[in-house]
Amino acid sequence: MTPSSRTVRRTAALAVTAAAALAVTVAQTPAQADNKPSRTVDVRLIGINDLHGNIEPPTGSSGRVTLSDGTTVEAGGAAYNATHIKKLQSEVKNSVIVGQGDLIGASPIVSALFHDEPTVEVLNHVGMDTTAAGNHEFDEGYRELLRMQKGGCHPVDGCQFNDRYEGADFPILGANVTLAKNDLPALPPFWVEFREGVPIGFIGMPLKDVPILVDPNGIKELEFGDEVKAANRYADLLNWLGVKSIVLLIHQGDNTSGGGPDDCRTVEGGPGRRIAEQVSPKIDAVFSGHSHQHYNCTVTDPAGNPRPFIEGLAFGRELSVVDLKIDKRTREVVRSATVARNRVVTKDVTPDPAIQAIIDQAKAKSGPIANRPVGTIAADVPRAQNAAGESPLGYLIADSQLAATQGNGAVLALMNPGGVRADLSFASSPAGEGDGVVTYGEAFTVQPFGNILQTVTLTGAQIKAALEQQWQVVNGATRQIVLQPSKGLTYSWSASAPIGSKVSDVVLNGAPLDPAASYRVTINSFLQGGGDGFSVFTGGTAITGGGIDLDAFAAYLTANPGTTPPALGRITTTP
């Protein structure tokens, strides 16, 4: 099916749904009295979440799936993904391809260099029907997300991947996303697909915490509401329209205690399960995302009926498959017949040639930039944090940001750990040989967001308050986000102290931090806008812009050949 015909079909689908609402409702009839079996339609739902532009097969641990028995299998890659999807579709008469968000954003350079246009083109060719927006769909702001949907060249970089960018053929949904000025939907809240004349409704949305996960400056005109309330509102609307089979695509999920693709070992009290259990009984299945974990669970809805709650591993390593049986007369899902599973995207199949051609084009165009050396390292620089919250790579990035902004008078830099996306590896080949060369592409993979550095004036009291905000109560649970300080700052924090009083002994360049003194502090635009809940940074004054964070990182590596991992000890803990 061509993109244009898909668009026409979808437009007609919604028009028919709205115009025939009363007719559809009236047409519902009681069960037949002759005891003949109801005619049903089988529909396979194929979900993908948290792709993050990984159109090439991901590498290292990001390219492996751990099975229930503890063994691992290499997985992922859009060309393999497409082959597995075609195989799944060939096994049934009816299928719908859906997404649970973060299909773009925080992507490898092969896609991100072109603002993820290659990934959207891949998804168009695969036949994506609809997807929820995730938080990373908002990385470049609301206006850029609209461009990704509707098409058009990038306002700054133009069209670099192809002469034209046609946009996504599938609607990107945000049922809980509204315009602040009038409370109207900022994105389509739901979508309806028809299979054998039966409508299937899809409600999609990101998690409500998007404002603290992306640069707030790009979403100032938006509000993000409660997920359960939004899901229930549109489930009621769809039901009134005569759509009785309803699926929730939610970019919120749970962590796990391990397990394989079809185990259900979610951590108790997770936000994903809470949503899956609390949303309307009218919703028949819940596809989730965001946590980058895999699980296949059955939860009980508020009416006491079972429904699947499922998520696949991130980066295209798994597809979440839910088979529904729908009664043609009542248009209701026969819950007892639902079958769910996660399918590993193994590499023992022939990669789809059309998808591989798109990938090859992106690699060819990005290669000269991605393969350019920017520096060398003497050993691996990992991003993992120790018990105190220290990350060698986080420290290195903070040091680079301080060095890049000393012309702004900066004496300190603070880096958010969520902006550090991958290890910096000494090895330069799969076999493990290493020359320590760091390419621009590798540096980009570490820092893909393109945040602008901002140097602001903060008092010592504000800096201390910002450090206290590393512990926050979110949805009734304590969340810890330890900022990575540049060299020269040391402090201690107590695990047992109450929130708001955990930090002590803050020292900058050998002197205790003076609460009344003013300091020039470099942070990225994400933090400066209050990202990750660090509202103190929004009170900074005398803002002086710097360069792009990635440029600062690359320049630091160039200026310091043979860079070694920074020593730990800037942050210590006490009982």
Image: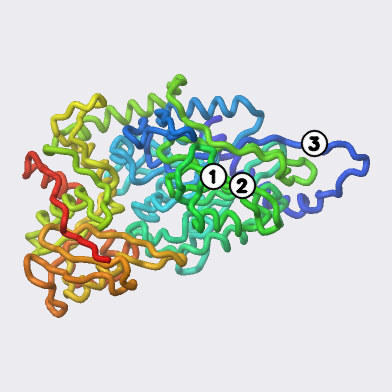
- Residue at image position (38%, 60%) is 219
Determine the residue located farthest toward the right in the rendered image.
Answer: 34
Decide: few, some or many residues near mark 2? Use Cα within 10 Å; few <14, some 14-19, many ≥20.
Answer: some
Query: Mark 3 or mark 1, which has the lower sequence index?
Result: 3
Q: Is residue 159 above or below residue 401?
A: above
Tell me the mark number nearer the camera, choosing from 1 and 2: 1
Dot 1, crowdedness within 10 Å: few (<14), some or many (≥20)? some
Residue 272's spot in the image, x, y percent? 51, 54
**What's under tag 2, amino acid-wise?**
Thr
Rendering coords of residue 156 (x, y %): 27, 48
Contact between marks 1 and 2 (CB within 8 A): the answer is yes
Which mark lies nearer to you, 3 or 1?
1
In this figure, which residue is indicated by the disc labeled 3?
39
Residue at (14%, 45%) from the top-left corner?
Answer: 565
- Depth check: 151 or 414 in front? 414
Helix or strand or loop: what does disc 1 sit on?
loop
Residue 570 placement, left or right of 34: left
Report the side of 307 relative to 503 (left or right): right
Q: Residue at x 14, y 63 (%)?
A: 489
* Distance from Cα at disc 3 to Cα at disc 1: 32 Å
Q: Is residue 547 visible?
A: no
Q: Which residue is mark 2?
A: 298
Which residue occupies the foreground of this view, 247 or 340?
Answer: 340
Disc number placed over residue 264 in the picture, else none: 1
Which residue is located at x 16 percent, y 59 percent?
570
